[in-house]
Image: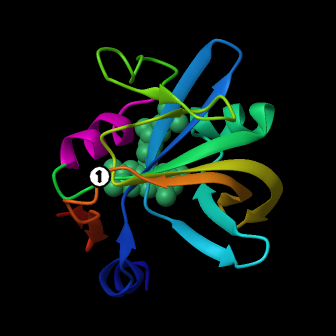
Amino acid sequence: MQDIAFDALVHGVYVVTTRVRDIINGMTASWVSQVSLKPLLLMVSIAPARYTHDLILESRVFAINVLTVDQVDLGKRFGYKSGRKVDKFAGLEYKTAKSGAPFLPQAYAYFDLKLVDTFTAGDHTLFVGEVADARILQKAAPPLVFHKKDFF
Ligand SMILES: Cc1cc2nc3c(=O)[nH]c(=O)nc-3n(C[C@H](O)[C@H](O)[C@H](O)COP(=O)(O)O)c2cc1C
């Protein structure tokens, strides 16, 4: 049944970032969704083993960067290694959102969020954030899509 979920459900590809004091980190996530209009709430589902999971619990803020079709490389950079072992921002241009979380100016858009709730959901944790700021950054390229365990 898991294969059917991967096959049939379509997601975007995002880099979820945060900052704790002078530590910045980000991870690729595809399980991201809007969950409320007023207030405007988004959620990301993150496995407890991810470094980003613990960092967001501590910082209580995060940013969601929407990757474009040209940014498969960024999806791989942030999705295949842990920030516990490598600095995924090394050599990469980034800016700082109002919350302090880093964002990627080359992304399609970013949302700056304040953590309002967490829920344990099976083997993941749902992080629900209220959007404090949001910007479209690069309109030209459409957002990247994750489908059938791959991204295009
Ligand atoms: C395309 C793609 C989508 C991913 N989606 C998620 C996700 O939604 N939730 C999650 O917990 N991990 C997801 N991952 C895995 C994390 O990005 C990966 O484990 C990452 O290395 C964690 O980094 P960190 O330990 O620095 O937080 C995804 C990876 C890829 C390549």
**Magenta region, residue range:** 71-82
Q: Can residue 149 be seen in this view?
A: no
Is 22 situated above or below 27? above
Is 144 situated above or below 4? above
Residue 118 lies within the magenta run: no
Name the residue located 37 percent from the left edge and 31 percent from the top edge.
81
Residue carrying label 1: 138
Magenta stretch prevailing secondary structure: helix
- Rendered location of residue 48, percent (x, y): 66, 45
Q: Quadrant of the N terminus?
A: bottom left
Name the residue located 61 percent from the left edge and 32 percent from the top edge.
101
Is 116 situated above or below 19? below
Q: Tell me where residue 147 sits by quadrant.
A: bottom left
Task: Check disc 1 and give the amino acid type.
Answer: Gln
- Rendered location of residue 62, percent (x, y): 64, 42
- Rendered location of residue 49, percent (x, y): 60, 40
Q: Quadrant of the C terminus?
A: bottom left
Q: Residues within 10 Å of mark 1 (few under 14, many from 20)?
A: some
Name the residue located 46 percent from the left edge and 40 percent from the top edge.
27
Of residues 46 and 73, the one nearer the viewer is 73
